[in-house]
Image (cartoon, grey):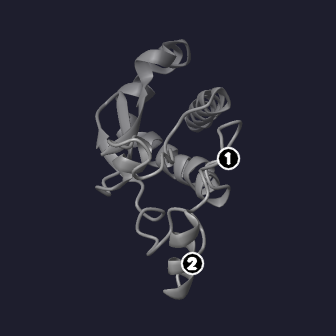
Amino acid sequence: MISVDVDFNNTLDVLHAVESIAQNQRKWGLFRKMARFLFHSWWGETFARSGARRGHPAWKPLNERYAIWKAKQGKSKAILRYYGHLQASPNILGESKTTLQWGTNIPYAQYHQAPTKPGRPPKREIIFVTRKDESEIESFVRDFIDNVLRKK
């Protein structure tokens, strides 16, 4: 399993003002909305740009023999897309009052994220967090809190 852990204890400056929202995030649907945001913003962009997202290096191209074989099978030339299971797999893996664990349970994802043998398979990180991502999460949470406060 590979995942991104979002822990509100790291963003208490935002949450102190609205502790009731943090304690009742399920009622407000914060993590569900955040998971959708992560899927559309990070995951989609990572696959669309073959890993080259916000300063992160692009994934290594397919091995030439494998690319030829894949084409003969009528499969996409896109990296990490054979059946499309991995690309369609992100979900909420765990959730508590203050923590969201978001990622994939696809067993082979972990080997692309961090290969156990050098180069086998080539390292192609699927989940990574850039500084811009951290800033976007913080803005997302602040906007969410502002919207909830307007409704109260």
Q: SS class of the residue under badge 1?
A: loop
Q: Which residue is mark 2?
A: 68
**Rendering quarter of residue 138:** top right
The percent coordinates of residue 128 (x first, y second) are 52, 37
Taking the spot 34% from the left edge, 43% from the top edge, the residue there is 117
Residue type highlighted by circle 2: Ile
* CA distance separating discs 2 and 1: 23 Å
In the orientation shown, which residue stands out farthest toward the right?
55
**Residue lying farthest front?**
65
Quadrant where the C terminus is found in the figure: top right
Instruction: Examine the rendered structure and indicate whether residue 140 appears above or below residue 71.
Output: above
Q: Can you say whether 50 is above or below 83 in the image?
A: above
Residue type at mark 1: give it. Ala
- Above or below 143: residue 107: below
Q: Nearer the viewer, mark 2 or mark 1?
A: 2
Q: Residues within 10 Å of mark 1 (few under 14, many from 20)?
A: some
Query: Toward the viewer: 21 or 96?
Result: 96
* Residue at left offset 45%, top offset 65%: 88
State left or right for residue 66 relative to residue 107. Answer: right
Q: Which mark is residue 142?
A: none
Residue on which the image places disc 1: 52
